[in-house]
Amino acid sequence: MQAEAVAAAPAETDTALSADDWSSAIKTHGGGVAATVTELRRARGQRGTQKAPKKVATALRMDETALARWRASGKGWQTRAAALLAKYAP
């Protein structure tokens, strides 16, 4: 009876991935364990270190209507305002 149950059960290799299937493997560029771990972390969505800060957070006090006009100008208003301030900076 046991022999019949074993014969009726599907083989393990039918349901498992074969040893030659590398389609879902994570590929790294080498460089040792530390480099591989860093690369795998980045692959999961973590951001790497910035080379140099591009912007500085600051507080700027301005008239309420001027701020409303800048915001109403659409996406990227802070970049445009910064460019205008840089143009007229002493």
Image (tube, rainbow, N blue to C red):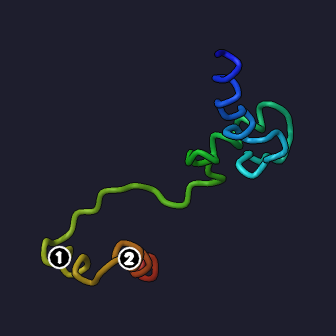
The residue carrying mark 2 is 76
- Can you tell which quarter of the image residue 71 is in? bottom left
Please tell me whether residue 48 is drawn above or below residue 87 in the rendered image. above
- Classify the position of the N terminus by image quarter: top right
What amino acid is labelled 1 in the image?
Ala
Q: Residue drawn at (58%, 48%), measured in percent from left and top?
A: 47
Choose between 83 and 24: the one closer to the eye. 24
Choose between 13 and 18: the one closer to the eye. 13
Residue 75 location, x and y as percent? 34, 77
Q: Residue drawn at (73%, 46%), measured in percent from left and top?
A: 26
Dot placed on the residue nearer the N-terminal end, 1 or 2: 1
What is the secondary structure assignment of the residue under circle 2?
A: loop
Please tell me whether residue 37 is drawn above or below residue 83 in the rendered image. above
Residue 2 location, x and y as percent? 66, 15
- Classify the position of the C terminus by image quarter: bottom left
Q: CA distance from mark 1 to mark 2?
A: 14 Å
What amino acid is labelled 2 in the image?
Gly
Query: Is 1 situated left or right of 82 in this image?
Result: right
Choose between 23 and 59: the one closer to the eye. 23
The residue carrying mark 1 is 68
Instruction: Return the residue found at the far top.
Output: 2
Q: Residue drawn at (40%, 55%), measured in percent from left and top?
A: 57
Query: Which label lies toward us, 1 or 2?
Result: 2
